[in-house]
Image (cartoon, rainbow, N blue to C red):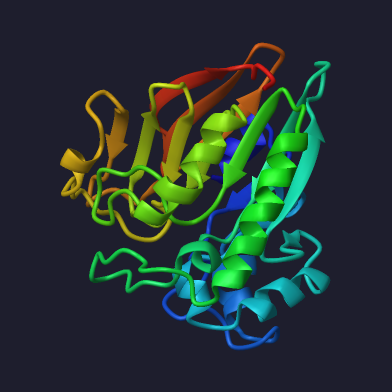
Amino acid sequence: MGRTAAARGADFVLALGDNFYYSGVRSVTDTRFQDTFESVFKAESLRKVPWYVVAGNHDHSGNVSAQIAYSKVSKRWNFPNYYYSKQFPVPGFNTTLGLVLIDTVLLCGNTDDFEGAEPEGPQDAGVARRQLGWLRRVLAASRDDYLLVAGHYPVWSVAEHGPTRCLLKHLQPLLLKYHVTAYLCGHDHNLQHLQDKAGVGYVLSGAGNFMEQSRSHARRVPPGYLHFFYGEPSSLGGFAYLEADGKELSVTYIEAGGKVLYKTAMPRRTHP
């Protein structure tokens, strides 16, 4: 990952949740910040760029507020709130990229990652409604050429956890209505690229810890949606590299050793 960032360039890194297995962190001084973040992602190419963070279900088993507070400790760790948005100019092109980061656990509830169970609903319905209202306003106001939404739970997935019914009900209609370029997520421990009939892309990159080859929920995903899947158990994992220009957003899936596994592209957004 560090070599890819050095060779291709990187403006920022996204951490799509479950940042600290298995039960998050206890406090802002938890040794996990050093042991499994600072001391692991230590390549210069990964140290000099900001990391934008969302929480996953395992993070919510610990102290998410401590992860947010760590933003004041680490210059590169950016986690200002449970949900937030950013905008970036695309260097060399007269275009912008909007990034909307959400907390899918607050939206849909927590779940046991190892049982494959779906979240059954938010712990606080009012908190979920407020986040959805905020998300709707942010998406409606966006005039970015590329618009990405990032969360932990998948909307669509053929793997162990499968599609998230809560997100299909509450999030997917917003992705479609506001012509979102792609939804980025983790949760399932593999790499996937899916695309729906409306052209919204779904980039699943959850291969930073475990690798899981199950496609147990393939029948719950409409035919033709899945374009790429990688869950080789012997692999050390992988990640997705995104790059925008004046015409398209390219997405390259890269194995931990640097091998390019798959590449696709998504067109510049047409504004609603």
27 relative to 270, above or below = below
Question: Which residue occupies 77% across, 50% down?
Answer: 48
Towards the viewer: 272 or 240: 272
Question: Which residue occupies 32% across, 69% down?
Answer: 113
**Where residue 66 sits in the image (x, y, percent)?**
68, 80
Question: Which residue occupies 45% across, 38% down?
Answer: 203
17 relative to 257, above or below = below
45 relative to 166, above or below = above
Towards the viewer: 180 or 126: 126
Could you tell me which quadrant the C terminus lies in? top right
Could you tell me which quadrant the N terminus lies in? top right
190 relative to 255, above or below = below
Q: Quadrant of residue 178?
A: top right
Q: In the rendered image, is residue 180 in sight?
A: no
Residue 212 shown left or right of residue 122 in the figure: left
**Where residue 262 sits in the image (x, y, percent)?**
38, 26
Q: Quadrant of residue 256?
A: top left
Towards the viewer: 118 or 241: 118
The total of numbered circles placed on residues is 0
Q: In the rendered image, is residue 17 in sight?
A: yes
**Where residue 199 sits in the image (x, y, percent)?**
46, 21
**Where residue 125 sits in the image (x, y, percent)?**
54, 71
Q: Quadrant of residue 53?
A: bottom right
